[in-house]
Image (cartoon, rainbow, N blue to C red):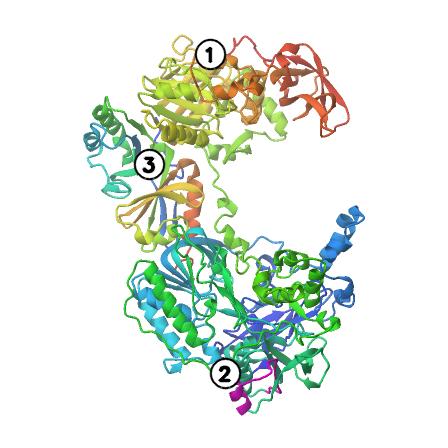
Amino acid sequence: MSEPVTALQGASFDGFARVREIGPLGMITLRAKAGTKGLDKAVKAALGLALPAPRRMVWEGPADAGRGIGWMGPDEFLLVLPHADLPAALAALEAGLQGSHYLAVDVSDARCVFRIEGETADQVLRKLMPVDFDRLEPGELRRSRAAQVPAAIWAGEGGFTLVAFRSVAGYVMGLLSHSAQPGSELN
Amino acid sequence: MSTRLAKGGRLIDRSAGMEFTFNGKRMRGFAGDTLAAALLANDQMLVGRSFKYHRPRGIVASGAEEPNALVNLGTGARLEPNQRTTTTELFDGLAATSQNHWPSLELDIGVLNNAFARFLPAGFYYKTFMHPRPFWKHVFEPVIRQSAGLGKVPTDPDADRYEQAYAYCDLLVVGGGVAGLQAARIAGASGARVIVLEQSPHWGGRAPVDGDVIDGAPAADWINATLQALEKMENVTLRSRTMAHGVFDHGYVLAEERVADHTPGDGRPRKRLWRIRAAKVLTATGAIERPLSFAGNDLPGVMLASAARDYVVNWAVSPGDRTVVVTNNDDAYRTAIALVEAGLSVPAVIDARAEVTGALPARARALGIAVHAGRAVVKVKGGKRVTGVSIGLQAGEGAVLDEISCDAVAMSGGWSPVVHLYSHCGGKLTWDRKRAMFRPDPDRPPLTHDGSPLVYPAGAANGALSAAEALADAVETGLVAVKALGLKPGTTPLGRAEPADEAPMDPVWIMPQGAGAALKAKMWLDYQNDVKVSDVQLAAREGYQSVEHTKRYTTLGMATDQGKLSNINGLAVLAGALSEDIPAVGTTTFRPPYTPVTLGALAGEARGEIFQPLRRTPMQDWHQAQGAYLEPVGLWRRPYCYPRAGETHEQAVHREILNTRSNVGMLDASTLGKILVKGPDAGRFMDMLYTNVMSTLPVGKCRYGLMCNEQGFLSDDGVVVRLSDDSWLCHTTSGGADRIHAWMEDWLQCEWWDWQVFTANLTEQFAQIAVVGPKARQLLERLGGMDLSKEALPFMSFAEGTLGGFPVRAYRISFSGELSYELAVPAGQGAALWAALLAAGADLGLQPYGTEAMHVMRAEKGFIMIGDETDGTVIPQDLGLDWAISKKKADYLGKRGQERSFLASPERWKLVGFETLDGSVIADGAYVPAPGVNGNGQRNVQGRVTSTYLSPTLKKGIAMGLLKNGPGRMGEIVEFTTADGKGMVQARVTSPVFYDPKGEKQDV
């Protein structure tokens, strides 16, 4: 067994905002329709958190080592947790949802996760994502795109967390670095 | 002489001198100058040559509408052609060269075209260069390209960087003149989120130049106060140097910000493309003055009256010592007055109107300016610059009554509202007879998604030309827009300008109105494309009636300025020639962009490393460190082969194949699609997706399956794995992963919404490594941790466990015909497992192999490849895959499609193998011809090759292909076309399985 590595092994860039790859984080895709028997309890048991409202991320703890659950769609949730806690969380979900129709699967390695931090961190993302950041509410999770690839973001802990697919981690890092270059502030 | 005046210039800073060059000549200007202003200050009246006749051309305007004064700006990696000097801010060290001159601006040989102008009439391309046909490509086009064309194409990669940004607002105000500012203030006070864009670096538009008085004080005071108020509003964003150039459906507006155009090399992005989503758009885009069509109106020194005024007031630049003003309206008198007040001479105002009354002419007369009513400029005199004008009667035919010497002519044919942005999304115009202009039709605005107006034109852009009218219109329109947004107006101070006492203008389209052919051939409508009054009239005589056709025939309005000065004059001339009403002729279509946009801004960040999202597997770094030759597979870049020193790619591929077949090879198969399907109805769903039965696959087993679209055509293939009672893992092709996942969701969400099935795309969760060859088991056993024997893990089964400490799922599947394992490991450990295998297998002869070796090996085994054997018109039955099509199932996607007569026909081309008699390799894409020709006179065909390789294993050419009735023709000799098309090559029809037909090697 080797230690899991992230796609970019913690790359970072300091521009007018700070960009850094974080992780490896544990991530679970949970698919279950609202009202599925045992869903609330299973999630609580797996994560210690309640189910999020539509388009919300419930987060607890520091940005790069906390726990969270995000609403990804009417029948899909994203669970984030420390990598080491993942097997137990999956087991808890399986136990709690036994007999119900659901899908829970480890997607930790399928993703890359970035933090964009600093007072003007939003400006980095305004250049890449068709998202109205003025109206992005605290705890709101947005599934959108960063330039040419899918990406999800939420705000908190003095910045933004951005999740994309692992294979395009280098591309996303390139985008974020390009957009954070000093002198290219939007105001 | 154009020159810098000793005093004045509200936009320049005389303490900040700047040096620049034009055609290598050193010149000086001031901070705040435009390049055009600085050129004029250095008496550089001649700035370019025209497109067709190479006539000398000077600066005619002072803004975005400029047709003539385009230059190559910058050098080397910062060279950009066709830059408008009138909107280019001067910076120290600027280097510009004139365009379309040869060998020099002063002496241009192409001007000979001018002498032969009568042989280059409208549509001359169409008339002259038709025959003989080869001449176009080899003679006419090269010559025309040499003499025509604007600017130089840069050869170096652009040194600058660009970016884009998204913005959202309730109201987007385009234009920072007094109307825009007033409307923005009203909207801001209502609480709306407002963005105000101004194309220039300065706010306030024309009002300060025109001497407008607002609330009893000079307009500049009101502009400053309003700007300060807007800056204090948190809900208002002001952005200057930003040109909104296109309005699209649903309030999507594109705008280009010139971030560092005027400070090159300071590290900032040069330009930024704003992608704005606005609920409503308010266009306060002003108006553009029209030229007058008199002979010689293109000579350097002939300028729009408003531009002459701008240069004097804004930049303290005089267009000439003696300027004759020629007009059909009162506004041009402002120019006469401004020039005289600046100490310059205006020998005459030539006014086409029979009677000239009104306050402005009275002021001009009081200043001692001679006003000649009912007169026309018959002709401008001069060569490379104006030396004088001949005067006659506007009502006449051009008899000269008088001559006035002068060095500049300021002309005004009235004003046209800038209706471009309003029109982009379908806003309709109405002809305002009194003011002789097209303005937005209030009853037919562009509509947005809910049927309400999208764009609200205000101020001069709405036809309200004077300051008083413009401000009143902006107030009214601003309130309408606020109401349309569902907001309540707050309390806002409303600016009020003093009404101007202006007499009506008199439309003048040809000057003098009865001018003969000689004069009309020198009356320019479109300066940039060299279209004259005579050209449009000729087009009308030749039968062109539609304004759109005339535009294309004459090229009127088709240059980089898109006819900002010429369109209205041109269509009025056309209307006159057709004896039609102007509104009956109508305008050409206004299309984005309003002004040219730098391609770099459109590309934004997508350049170099981030041009495209290239997908990388966890082992990509290793592949590239090995010098692997990469090939694109979707957005992946997969190793095609790993050439060693001195090896060709073909040699590398052959080495990789032979080594894999005799020792052990290793392939990065991480790109394969991996989609999890789970739920109580998952088996039923799988049986619909695949042509064969997947619901009966035992847990722990693998099965090859085919997916078809509804038409029955083969769409994707791969190995399906039964993970548990209610879950399956579907492997797809590398390029098909996202498409097939979307296909599954489409059926689940739209058709079988009540089926209890969930899917998840796990493609990137796993690195997948194929370990292939007779020594594969030996290698994996060295890592240890799992029983990989034939008994414990038979062919087409899988097991989960740990190998060398890595958590893996090991599939015993083979795409090569050899003993083969595919190992799936979490992506974060993929590179480590790859390294562990390499280390463990060194003495077994382990070598990585690339996609080409994979392709050849599968072809040796007769395995099909999606995209090679399929092309969207092939059904599984064509490929001899009937064994993978269930006869028992009631339905699957594609079943009914395959039952259609053409697809069920026994006459179809079917898969067979081919072996050339001489051992050579059949050309890629080669056909098997059949006797006779088809209805198009093309040779009939009866088959074609789909995969063809030199097999290093069999040491001869092998191929698969589709042949009419193929399987019934085993042993027959057929002939293929060759790559050079000259000879034919004979091949024997065989089974497509060339290697180990019994499948013994993979099942050991």
Amino acid under label 1? Lys
Residue B803 in view of the camera: no
Q: Which residue is mark 2?
A: B8
Residue B662: image location, x then y, percent: 55, 15
The image's mark for residue B887 is 1
Q: Is residue B835 left or right of residue B91?
A: left
The image quarter containing residue B679 is top left
Q: Is residue B367 above or below residue B717?
A: below
Q: Which residue is mark 3?
A: A24
Q: Earlier in the sequence, mark 2 or mark 1?
A: 2
Amino acid under label 2? Gly
Does B224 lie within the magenta span? no
Foreground disc of the pair 3, 1? 1
B619 or B817: nearer the eye?
A: B817
- Identify the subunit bearing mark 1: B
- State the quadrant of the N terminus of chain B: bottom right
Per the rendered image, the range of residues in magenta is B345-366
Residue B352: image location, x then y, percent: 61, 80
Q: Residue at x 67, y 15 (%)?
A: B915
Does label 2 lie on the same chain as label 3? no
Residue B170 in view of the camera: yes
**Circle 3 crowding by C-alpha within 10 Å: few under 14, some 14–19, many from 20:** many
